Image: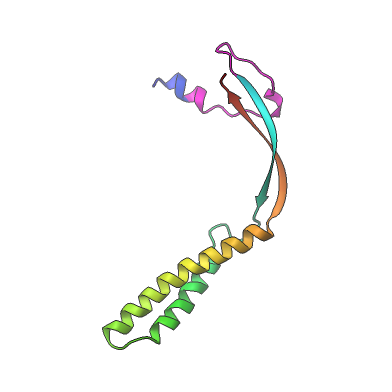
Amino acid sequence: MSLAMVSASAQSYGPQDEGRRFSDGSRVVCEKVEVRRSSGDPNRIAGTAAGAIIGGLVGNQIGGGNGKKVATVGGAVAGGAIGRQVQGNSQESKGERVVETRCQRVYR
């Protein structure tokens, strides 16, 4: 793939380009799309950390000796994953709704 083709395919289009036609028969089409934007923690660090701490504490209550260490680590990993998922679901349901215009080149 040549450099010219790469830069042409990386082209972005906006509402001002709607209806624009190209020599290969393609054209720019725009549509309004509703998206949710989360204004909170995009990396979900708080949920992951809280889940890991709680999971580690619960895992530490299980077994004894090396089994206790394994359960603590396993609980922290599982708790972190669950905490991240819970925070993500909460952010998605509470995110603000925004209507964006998205444009793309259509080949027909």
Farthest residue, direction front: 108
Q: Residue 58 appears in which quarter of the rendering?
A: bottom left
Residue 34 in which image quadrant: top right
Provide residue 71's location: percent of width, then percent of height. Answer: 35, 79
Q: Quadrant of the C terminus?
A: top right
Residue 93: image location, x then y, percent: 66, 59
Query: Foreground residue, 10 or 59?
Result: 59
Image color mode: rainbow
Q: Is 8 above or below relative to 59?
A: above
Left or right: 24 as drawn, with respect to 56: right
Assess whether residue 60 is covered by the magenta stretch: no
| Residue range of the region highlighted in magenta in the rendering | 7-26
Q: Position of residue 89 (x, y in %)?
A: 59, 61
| Residue 15 belongs to the span the image colors magenta | yes
Total number of numbered discs in the rendering: 0
Residue 105, quarter of the rendered image: top right
Identity of the residue drawn at 37% across and 79% down: 72
Q: Main secondary structure of the magenta part?
A: loop
Residue in view at x 70 percent, y 40 percent: 100
> Eyeballing the image, is 76 above or below 93?
below
Q: Position of residue 73 (x, y in %)?
A: 36, 75
Q: Quadrant of the N terminus?
A: top left
Residue lying at the far top of the rendered structure: 23
